Image: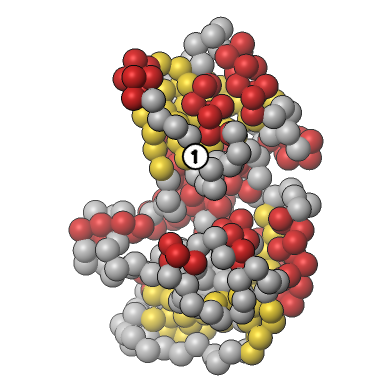
């Protein structure tokens, strides 16, 4: 079958032929892919930026944002049937460790990360995963193109859901929450902040098209400014107090430093984007009693809750579909910022 693989770090991905995935364990499920989202993490993988962190070996089939149809199930799977439309949680987990027992899937001690750690992902016609990873979807995925469009919710949406739910204690009445970035994750985050909290939502997004998307999705204030100017603007908006929460979806360059500058006393800096860093001054952390949160992907329960909101029409995400064989061109478009929402590959 066709697949998109990294065959050499630093080079564009290649269209290859690989064997069809097969059921090997009782809880295995083969999913026929309707769509696979392109995440910036995929771009970092191609560049070789995650080789050491995940001990990656090439060739590697990318794709950790996937949706499709159940094509085959193992002997131990009774709650899924061939033909069921599903969205695929990014993690394959054991189900019996402390993390899994407590519902924190991403804390599984032996988890696998298809499309990232060597387990073949969904940039292909089919992939194999665990039945534990799948969430059935209803009418929102009734049509093939609609199901393909759900794929980015598996990571972009799920990460936003996880991060926003952790911000709820900081985002009460009268609070200001700043969202740095309005790409795919940011667009979902804005909607969830408006649904789950009464806080005023301020989006910082220099790109005009993405800034307009944030306005359309309900952001109270959109600042089309670079981070340094935006930090001053946030302080002005809050009478010098700062924001109760800053959700950093960029994490690069000078953005983390400016994010810290925006924080009010008792506030939280919530990190999703990566690639940069910030120096932590302990006295400042103590005097302002700040909290820093790192966010991985969310839980299976959070993915289920998110899909309920999508099904109800309360959360949406702009997507652009590309043929699977155009993966290199699509990834270049994402890298260049030419995709306002999320790009999705369709076999």
Q: Would residue 162 be visible to someone looking at this image?
A: yes
Q: Which element type, helix, strand or loop, lies under badge 1?
A: loop
Dot 1, crowdedness within 10 Å: few (<14), some or many (≥20)?
Answer: few
Q: Is residue 171 left or right of residue 317?
A: left
Q: Position of residue 169 (x, y in %)?
A: 37, 28
Residue at 44% of width from left, 53% of height from top? 297
Q: Residue furthest top?
A: 239
Percent from the top left, x then y, of residue 241? 50, 11
- Residue at image point 56% right, 27% down: 258
- Give the vertical position of 300 relative to 171 (above or below): below
Quadrant placement of the C terminus = bottom right
Question: From what the image shows, is residue 182 above or below residue 301?
Answer: above
Task: Tell me: residue 200, above or below residue 107.
Answer: above
Counting labels gives 1
> Residue 156's x, y, as percent?
56, 52
The residue lying toward the viewer, choosing from 201 and 295, is 295
Q: Nearer the viewer, residue 144 or 23?
A: 23
User: Image quarter for residue 329?
Assistant: bottom right
Q: Please give the name of the residue rendered at 77% of the width and 58% of the height, measured from the top-left corner.
A: 333
Please tell me which residue is depicted at 69% across the width and 79% down the height of the picture.
14
Q: Which residue is mark 1?
A: 277
Q: Position of residue 105 (x, y in %)?
A: 33, 58
Q: Is residue 32 visible?
A: no
């Amino acid at each position: 079958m066709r697949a998109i693989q990294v065959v050499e770090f630093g080079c564009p991905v290649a269209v290859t032929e690989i064997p069809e995935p097969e059921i090997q364990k009782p809880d295995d499920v083969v999913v026929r892919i309707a769509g696979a989202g392109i995440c910036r993490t995929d771009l970092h993988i191609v560049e070789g930026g995650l080789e050491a962190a995940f001990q990656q070996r090439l060739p590697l089939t990318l794709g950790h944002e996937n949706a499709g149809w159940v094509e085959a199930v193992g002997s131990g799977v009774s709650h899924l049937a061939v033909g069921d439309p599903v969205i695929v949680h990014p993690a394959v987990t054991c189900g019996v460790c402390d993390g899994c027992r407590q519902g924190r899937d991403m804390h599984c001690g032996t988890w696998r990360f298809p499309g990232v750690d060597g387990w073949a992902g969904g940039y292909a016609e089919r992939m194999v995963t665990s039945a534990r990873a799948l969430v059935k979807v209803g009418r929102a995925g009734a049509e093939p193109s609609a199901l393909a469009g759900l794929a980015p919710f598996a990571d972009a949406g799920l990460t936003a859901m996880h991060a926003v739910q952790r911000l709820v204690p900081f985002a009460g009445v009268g609070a200001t929450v700043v969202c740095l970035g309005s790409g795919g994750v940011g667009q979902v985050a804005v909607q969830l902040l408006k649904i789950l909290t009464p806080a005023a939502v301020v989006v910082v997004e220099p790109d005009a098209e993405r800034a307009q998307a944030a306005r359309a999705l309900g952001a109270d204030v959109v600042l089309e400014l670079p981070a340094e100017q935006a930090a001053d603007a946030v302080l002005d908006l809050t009478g010098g107090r700062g924001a109760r929460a800053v959700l950093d979806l960029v994490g690069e360059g000078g953005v983390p430093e400016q994010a810290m500058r925006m924080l009010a006393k008792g506030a939280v800096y919530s990190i999703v984007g990566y690639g940069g860093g910030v120096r932590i001054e302990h006295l400042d952390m103590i005097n302002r009693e700040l909290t820093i949160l790192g966010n991985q992907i969310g839980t299976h329960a959070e993915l289920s809750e998110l899909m309920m909101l999508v099904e109800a029409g309360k959360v949406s995400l702009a997507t652009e579909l590309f043929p699977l064989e155009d993966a290199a061109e699509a990834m270049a478009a994402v890298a260049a910022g030419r995709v306002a929402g999320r790009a999705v590959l369709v076999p």
